[in-house]
Amino acid sequence: MNFQQLRAVRETVRCDFSLTDAAVVLQASQSGVSRQIRDLEQELGITLFTRSGKRLVGLTLPGDHLLPIIERVLDSGLDLQQAGQAFLARQDGLLSIAATHAQARYALPDAVQRFRGFFPEVRLHLHQGSPRQIAQMLLEGEVDLGIATDLPTDHPQLAVFSCREWGHLAIVREGHSLLREAPLTIERLARHPLITYDSGLTGRSRIDEVFAAHGLKPEIVLTAMDADVIKRYVELGMGVGVIADIAFDSRRDTRLRALDAKHLFGANDTQLAVRRGGPLRQYAYAFADLFAPGLGQLAATQSGID
């Protein structure tokens, strides 16, 4: 038994037992409305309508008895839907976001700060993890939004959207030989010990693919989950760092110099993901819009609010 079957009964009665008119109201086919009624009658084990051939001409005694109950159930369903919509529209509660360190540290602060101005009653809970961990948190309903690069694409339950483009930088200490060897090439970069992200993080797969495509095996002396650690060891002279461009600020990172490496490793996408079939509070979509303008409505459509 479902609401669609109950609506078929109610609208058929309201349309003076005309299946054609009821189908127009329900935006369905006449055969579809007839099938919904027959399925309900079969499930209940009673006949709701009297028939003359294929035409419905009135309600049976059981049908007349059940019609007010059907009306109450549908009205209660509408009340429930309205209550749910009212809950989703409330501007207080909790918003949980999972992001990689690079996104949480460098890309999210502006959106978080502006969000707090618009929704001061909403508590924010920020989780950090790898792209696969973020996908799992979304699938388990632990978080509302996931933000990362290279989110897994093998989960049909997730809707994943590209929202920002970024590239890699090579970072070195002042006076490093790479600063005198412009332009930066993949061969020149491979001559130096490298410090970069752990596998599966912040475009690391793209870095490995490019070296492999050139038949190069760089000496990666250290890997880390976040750029701050990578920069620290570059400052100590352990090697050349390869980090996301969003993680470098010349005003703050005064002991380091950056060389553009986007032409070597290409562009990467920051992605935002939501779980399909689970409408979120409206402020979650507002946050998506603050992070990437125009993304909120798209995410709402894919997660089931539209």
Image (cartoon, helix red, strand yellow):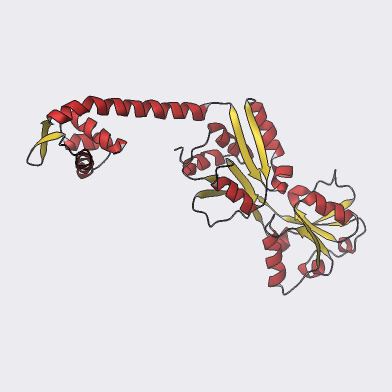
Residue appearing at x 75%, y 59% in the figure: 261
Residue appearing at x 56%, y 41% in the figure: 295
Quadrant containing the N terminus in the rendered view? top left
Q: Is residue 292 above or below residue 242?
A: above
Quadrant containing the C terminus in the rendered view? top left
Q: Is residue 291 left or right of residue 8?
A: right
Q: Is residue 71 left or right of residue 145?
A: left
Q: Is residue 65 left or right of residue 277?
A: left
Q: Is residue 147 above or below residue 94?
A: below
Q: Where is residue 178 shown, x and y percent of the image? A: 86, 63
Residue 270 can be seen, yes or no: no
Residue appearing at x 77%, y 48% in the figure: 247
In this view, the residue farthest toward the front is: 45
Q: Where is residue 139 shown, x and y percent of the image? A: 54, 47
Which of the two residues, 144 or 29, is positioned nearer the viewer here?
A: 144
What is the quadrant of residue 197 in the picture? bottom right
